[in-house]
């Protein structure tokens, strides 16, 4: 059995920081030992392959709980395949993604799951799992939820936005939540009042307000907070847990904080774009703002302070990417002259770990909170802990030797995502994944990619591990 020893690093998990050596055997973390201890010395003398982590952190591989590879949207599809997107994730120190299998209206949930399984099979560079999107809540799809939970797909996303595409009304949402309360599933919610937003979109276009910046102006923060409030109340009626995705607005955070103060099983996720970008980007001259069109939209910069505070207080529990890239040329430009036709989504799966480390450098969060938000909590939230999300005996050896002092400039010229622009073009950050292991196998090392398509395995999940 191949043995690998990662020595000399500072092991950082959500709960502790420890100067320890890590022994890997058979794709798992076999043991940890304090540096210089007898076990550590014996491992070093045993002939194990050694990875020198001196001056580096040894952290769990990132768990990105919200990605959209090869997702159809607005007459096109997201630019990253499962192969290119998971390879980019690996470059950035993310070793597990949870993508979304889409039920199309009129079809079964199972058909969507089977279609996405087929897309990912044999293509992924890192491990992967699936949520299911419910676009057609009916008696048949509700019954399917039970079987899927038993098979390890334990979270289901519904939309209060996009009427005519993904939208579910309050009655459908309540029925799905009730089913989740019975079978243990976690309801994920895109919380925006899509009916009202469509009115504002129609009015804006009729008045000649067609530029990308109006995407942010019509998708008002109050319509995010209203939908968040409504989703929370429906979850209370159903007795179901709720996870609100891509929270962007101060007002929506306030709704989550009130629910959590009541002790409810309500959780919030935000994304790097809301922490580092703003409506200033949507208002960039010409059509450049289209690069930053996503939903929920970017908000004015003063919302960022409230998001960071919520991440520190756990009113927001997870940072995922909502990685859904569309190329500027040939995809985003479908919306020239009509912001409502710009495909909604941004690239980010490669840079989440680094941007959150930059937040550590800037004092927004601690090192352990970095790992909690990016690794441990998403693993727990989506039923994969302690297999994923930590450095502990028995965990998968998804490990990152992270150089906290490496400086890099984010750019489309150097990133590995299959998209022709970077949302963070020219941004300087400190920190970089130097060596990345997936189940004990080195797939990235010192600027070289050593993995291949098919390295990643499908991960069936248990139910949410945070419920009270």
Image (tube, helix red, strand yellow):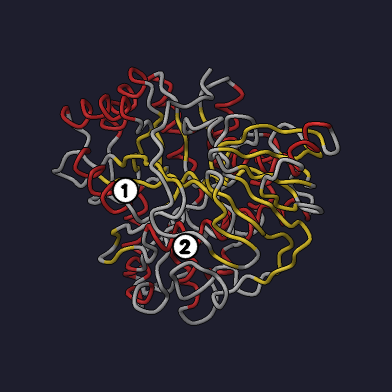
Label 2: which residue?
346
Percent of width and height locating residue 306: 67, 46
Label 1: which residue?
195
User: Residue pushed farthest bottom?
Assistant: 286
Between 258 and 317, the residue placed more toward the observer is: 317
Between 24 and 467, the residue placed more toward the observer is: 24
Q: In the rendered view of the protein, which quadrant contains the N terminus?
A: top right
Report the side of 270 relative to 344 (left or right): right
Q: Residue at x 42, y 42 (%)?
A: 191
Q: Is residue 378 above or below residue 295?
A: above
Question: Is residue 68 visible in this depiction of the protein?
Answer: no
Percent of width and height locating residue 88: 50, 61
Q: Secondary structure at mark 2?
A: loop
Question: Is residue 83 visible in this depiction of the protein?
Answer: yes
Q: Residues within 10 Å of mark 2 (few under 14, many from 20)?
A: many
User: Residue pushed farthest left?
Assistant: 106
Q: Residue at x 64, y 46 (%)?
A: 307
Percent of width and height locating residue 5: 69, 44
Q: In terms of sequence position, does the residue under pointer 2 or pointer 1 come before the other?
A: 1
Q: Residues within 10 Å of mark 1 (few under 14, many from 20)?
A: some
């Amino acid at each position: 059995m191949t043995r690998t020893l990662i020595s000399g690093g500072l092991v950082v998990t959500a709960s502790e920081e420890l100067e320890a050596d890590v022994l890997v055997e058979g794709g798992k973390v076999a043991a940890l030992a304090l540096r210089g201890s007898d076990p550590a010395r014996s491992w070093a003398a045993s002939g194990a392959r050694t990875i020198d982590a001196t001056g580096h952190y040894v952290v769990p591989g990132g768990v990105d709980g919200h990605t959209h590879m090869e997702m159809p949207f607005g007459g096109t599809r997201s630019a990253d395949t499962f192969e290119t997107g998971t390879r980019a994730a690996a470059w950035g120190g993310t070793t597990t993604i949870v993508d979304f299998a889409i039920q199309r209206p009129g079809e079964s949930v199972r058909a969507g799951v089977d279609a996405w399984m087929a897309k990912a099979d044999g293509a992924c560079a890192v491990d992967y799992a699936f949520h299911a999107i419910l676009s057609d809540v009916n008696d048949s799809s509700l019954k399917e939820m039970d079987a899927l939970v038993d098979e390890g797909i334990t979270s289901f996303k519904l939309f209060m936005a996009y009427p005519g595409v993904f939208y579910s009304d309050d009655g459908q949402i309540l029925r799905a939540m009730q089913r989740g309360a019975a079978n243990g599933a976690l309801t994920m919610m895109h919380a925006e009042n899509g009916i009202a937003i469509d009115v504002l979109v129609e009015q804006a276009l009729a008045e000649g307000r067609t530029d990308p910046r109006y995407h942010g102006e019509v998708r008002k923060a109050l319509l995010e907070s209203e939908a968040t409030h409504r989703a929370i109340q429906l979850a209370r009626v159903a007795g179901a847990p709720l996870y609100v995705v891509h929270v962007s607005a101060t007002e929506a955070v306030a709704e989550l904080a009130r629910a959590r103060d009541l002790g409810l099983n309500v959780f919030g996720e935000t994304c790097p774009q809301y922490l580092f970008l703003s409506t200033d980007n949507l208002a960039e001259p010409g059509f450049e703002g289209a690069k930053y069109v996503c939903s929920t939209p970017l908000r004015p910069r003063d919302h960022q302070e409230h998001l960071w505070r919520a991440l520190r207080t756990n009113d927001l529990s997870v940072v995922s990417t909502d990685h859904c890239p569309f190329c500027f040329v040939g995809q985003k430009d479908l919306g020239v002259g009509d912001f409502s036709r710009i495909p909604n989504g941004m690239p980010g799966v490669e840079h989440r770990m680094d941007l959150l480390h930059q937040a550590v450098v800037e004092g927004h969060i601690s090192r352990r909170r970095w790992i909690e938000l990016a690794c441990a909590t998403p693993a727990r939230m989506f039923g994969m802990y302690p297999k994923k999300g930590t450095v502990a005996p028995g965990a998968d050896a998804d490990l990152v030797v992270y150089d906290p002092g490496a400086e890099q400039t984010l750019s489309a010229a150097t990133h590995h995502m299959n998209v022709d622009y970077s949302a963070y073009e020219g941004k300087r950050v400190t920190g970089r994944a130097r060596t990345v292991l997936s189940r004990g196998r080195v797939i990235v090392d010192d600027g070289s990619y050593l993995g291949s398509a098919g390295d990643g395995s499908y991960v069936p999940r248990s139910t949410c591990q945070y419920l009270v």
